[in-house]
Amino acid sequence: MLNPLALELNHVIEERNKPVYEMFSLLGKSLYFPKGIVSQAGEARGKADRFNATIGMATEGGHPIYIDVIHKNLSAYDPKNLYPYAPPAGKPELREVWRKKLLKDNPSLEGKVFGIPIVTSGLTHGLSIVSDLFVEKGDSIILPDKYWDNYQILFNVRHGSETVTYPLFTKTNKFNVEGMLKALLSCKNGKAILVLNFPNNPTGYTPTVKEAEGILDAIKQAANLGVKIVAVMDDAYFGLYYEGSIKESIFARLVGLHPNVLPIKIDGATKEEYAWGFRVGFLTFGIQDPLVLEALEKKTMGSIRSTISCSPHLSQTIILDALLHPEFEMQRKERNKVMEDRARRVKEILADGKYADEFEPYPFNSGYFVCLRIKHFDAETLRIHLLNQYGVGTISLAKTDLRIAFSCVELNDLDRLFELIYQSCKELNQCYIKL
C-alpha cells in the first residue's frame, strides 16, 4: 500500500499530466517527501524563535558549533553557510542563480515554464534520481553505440532495464537521426528513456543546428505515435562548444514539444565550472504545469532524502559565491579557451592524414575528448602497449575505439602524444606480422 503522501502526489500528476504519470517506475510512484524531521525542522525554522530543538546538529550562541582546525581554512565564509545541513533540494539562492544561468545560456527557454533546478551531489546522482523515478525492469534505455559506460550500472544493473543502441554516426559522419528514431519506435512497452549526451562522451561530438532539428522532429514523430519518452539531457560538458554545433542544450527546445515527452536536464558545476570534486550538479524538469513541477520536485526530494539526505553545504556555498563573482564569467571563458585551443590543435594534427593508415578520428567539435577508430587490431591491445611501453594512459572502449582526453594533455604535448600512438600502432603491426 502506497503512503498517502505518495498517493497525493500521484493524483496531482495523473490528473494534470497523465503521460508523465505513466512514465513513472513502481519506485517513482512510491516516492514522496516525508513530513518528518526535515519537514518539521523547516517549519520550526520560521516560527521557533525561543527554542529550536528539532534538528540533529549542535549550536552555541545561535550559531553552528565547529572545530577550529577545520574552520581555519574556511574563515572567509560565515559558519552558517558551511556547517548546517543544506535543504534537500539545495540552497534556494543557488537554485535561483542556476535557473537564471539556464535562461541566459539557452535562449530557446525564454518565455517557457520549467522547474527550478534541484541540487544533486554531482551529475551521476542526478541520473540516479532519474533512474529511481522512471526506470522499471524491461524498460528501454535508448543510447548511441558510443556512450559513457556508467549508464549500464545506473539503469540496467540497478533497475533491470535494457539498452537499445543505434549507430551514433551515419556513413557520412552525420548524427544518425534515423537510427535514433528506429530505436525509439522499437520499444516493447511504448515507453523509452532517451539519453542524449552532448558534447558526447567519448567522441566529443555535438550535433549541428540542422541535426538538432532532426532530433526534435524524430522525438516528436515517436511521441505522435504514442511512445512516452523520458528525454534525459546529460549536459555534463555543456558550454564547451568549439565549431559547427548547436550552442544550447536540446532540453531548451524539448520543453513544451509534446505531452508524451518529459524533458529532464542534468548538468552542473563539475565540468562547466571546472569543479569536479565539489560534486555540485542540478536536475531540472521541463514541464510547464507548476503543480506537476511541485509534485515532481517532492518526489525528487524523497529520492534524495532516502539516499544521501542532502548535498554538501560547503561546495554549494563556494559555487554560489563563484557564480555571483564579477570576474567569474571572464575566468571561465579563459579556461574554455584553453580547451578550445587543444581541440583545434588535435584537429590540425589529425587533418593531414599522416596517421590515417592506422587510425582516424570520429567527428568531434566540443567537450573534452576525441575518439579514434583503430584500424588493424584491438584498441585494448593498443592501450596496454601505450601504457607499458611509453607511460601513456588512454581509454579503450569498443573493440576499435580509443578515447583520448585532450583536456588533460598540455597543448605543446599533443603532437608527441599522437606520434606515440602512431608509433605504437606500427610496433604492434610488426608483432602481428611475425605472429
Image (cartoon, rainbow, N blue to C red):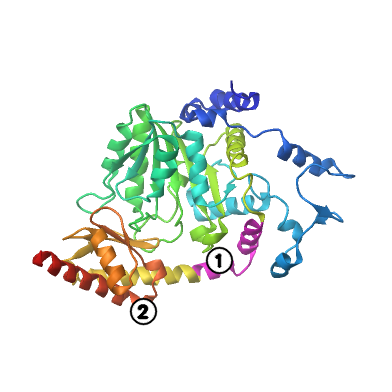
Of residues 48 and 431, the one nearer the viewer is 431
- Furthest residue toward front: 435
Residue 71 in the image: state x and y as whole percent.
73, 65
Residue at 51 percent across and 55 percent down: it is 105
* Contact between labelled residues 2 and 1, with CB atoms less than 8 Å apart: no
Residue at 23 percent across and 56 percent down: it is 400
Residue interval drawn in magenta = 314-333
Side of 190 where 315 appears, left or right: right
The residues tagged by marks 1 and 2 sit, at their Cα atoms, a distance apart of 26 Å
Q: Is residue 187 visible?
A: yes
Residue 305 in the image: state x and y as whole percent.
63, 40
Side of 316 where 79 appears, left or right: right
Q: Is residue 364 magenta?
A: no
The local crowd at label 1, few if under 14, some if 14 to 19, many if 20 or more residues have their Cα within 10 Å, is few
Residue that label 2 marks = 412
| Above-or-below relation of 238 to 72 | above
